Amino acid sequence: MKMKPFLLPLIFILLATSVYFLPEPGDMAPSAVNMEIPSQFEGWNTQNIPPSKEEIEILAEDTTFSKAVCSQQRVGEYIQATGATAYDRIDLSIVLSGYDLNNSIHRPERCMPSQGHLIGSSSVVDLDLANGRKMAVQRLLSVQSIPLRDDPTKFIRMNCLTYYFFVGNEKITPSHTERTLIDVKDRLIRGIDQRWAYVSVSMWYGDLKLPWIEKEIPIEEADSKLLDFIKNFAEKRIDWEMISS
């Protein structure tokens, strides 16, 4: 017998909200991700930055943040006004959940609008890593409105490409729904909670006129650089002995 279509949203709502009625937290199983961001990473210079005010206010107090601006010089390319060497920029964010499953981390689609993003599309991309493992990541295309420093009532609009995924104690998933279902099962059946790390990387593309780059960056170039960065991050900063196949 086929399930009636109207039952699917109801089942999803029940599963998504069931986390609010779970037993009290049990043992915390650590995430397999390394939260430390080195100052040099696979040819990228990294500068640690604090979490935004919105992130601190939205998420639970025991949430842990590691965030960095990553830069890499574009050899032979210069900024016309200053003569400085142009460079690429990737924004890296790692957010580690605490004890509060309901309010530690969530889908970035929920908080990105508060950062000026209008999300246009979402899809899943499968990756093959050099270590022989596989993983999937979520790909988002958005247009970000950024207020000008000298006049916050005016904005510039930037095309933005974002990839994200969640790293638990044993699993990696691009799906917030799957992560929630794993949490429900673990607490009900195993009596434990996984600490999940939400990892995201983003890059602007298109006709860029910024202090560090003045160039047309095709989306294909942004895609290639972000995916290479993710693969290196996954291979070097995730403990694969903890991850089940």
Image (cartoon, helix red, strand yellow):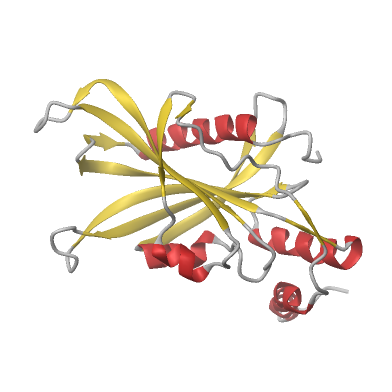
Residue 165 in the image, given as x and y percentages of width and height: 60, 49
In this view, the residue farthest toward the front is: 62
Residue 113 in the image, given as x and y percentages of width and height: 41, 66
* Residue 221 vertical position relative to residue 181 in the rendered view, above or below: above
Left or right of 193? Residue 66 is left
Residue 146 in the image, given as x and y percentages of width and height: 27, 58
Residue 45 in the image, given as x and y percentages of width and height: 40, 30
Q: Residue at x 42, y 66 (%)?
A: 54
Please identify the quarter of the rendering in which residue 8 is found.
Answer: bottom right
Left or right of 53? Residue 14 is right
Q: Residue at x 47, y 57 (%)?
A: 121
Quarter occupied by the C terminus: top right
Quarter occupied by the N terminus: bottom right
Left or right of 89? Residue 235 is right
Left or right of 98? Residue 29 is right
In this view, the residue farthest toward the left is: 81
* Residue 68 vertical position relative to residue 87 in the rendered view, above or below: below
Q: Residue at x 72, y 26 (%)?
A: 132
